Image: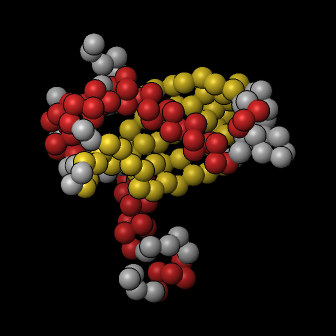
Amino acid sequence: MAPSITIQDKAIIKTRVWLSDIDVYPELNNGRHLTLMDLGRFDLGYRMGLFKVLRKQKWGLMVAGNFTRYRRRLLLFQKFSIETEIVGYDDRWYYFYQKTIRNELIHSSALIRTAVTSKNGIVPAKDVTAAMGIPYAPSVPDWVHDWIQLHEVSPSLNPKDLKRKAP
């Protein structure tokens, strides 16, 4: 079966806040935002044909970092959608931008850094794109590059830690 979307496309899944998703307030728990975003990345990867390649090559996936912003509450039983897209990649990492949206308003958003892995460690992006039969064209937007730079400079997000040396 041919992939239904490409690496440049956006995947959208529709869902709602269920009892198993809420905290004591009763709204979508902050951790569940990220868990549901996992489903968005799985949907995109499956529809792109990535999972077929992963299975064939015996590769896996990992999340190596994220920056998440929570803007508005999603209450019990409210319907919403999760939009997922790959905004860029470099030699090792793929960067996903994801949003939860209700009534055309963003409720949360996240930049997620991921990698494809093998028993030998991270699989270079050029090998992954070759296995998927797509051109290798690494590029990341400036705003993602700024986030990458922040993570490379400090093991912490605390500005005080910028003065400390990494172990």
* In the image, farthest residue toward the bottom: 164
Q: Residue at x 27, y 15 (%)?
A: 2
Where residue 148 sits, quadrant-wise, is bottom left
Image position of 138 with respect to 153: above or below: above
Whether residue 54 is visible: yes
Q: Residue at x 55, y 82 (%)?
A: 160
* In the image, farthest residue toward the top: 1
Q: Quadrant of the N terminus?
A: top left
Q: Residue at x 38, y 83 (%)?
A: 167
Where residue 102 sits, quadrant-wise, is top right
Q: Is 10 placed left or right of 56 in the picture?
A: right
Whether residue 134 is visible: no
Q: Between 164 and 52, which is closer to the camera in this rendering? A: 52
Image position of 164 with respect to 74: above or below: below
Query: x and y percent of residue 28 in the render?
Result: 72, 40
Image position of 9 with respect to 147: above or below: above
Q: Residue at x 40, y 86 (%)?
A: 165
Query: x and y percent of residue 20 in the render?
Result: 72, 35
Query: x and y percent of residue 152 in the render?
Result: 37, 69
Query: x and y percent of residue 79 in the render?
Result: 71, 24
Q: Is 127 placed left or right of 53 in the picture?
A: left
Image position of 71 with respect to 14: above or below: below
Scheme of colours in the image: secondary structure
Q: Between 131 and 120, which is closer to the camera in this rendering? A: 120
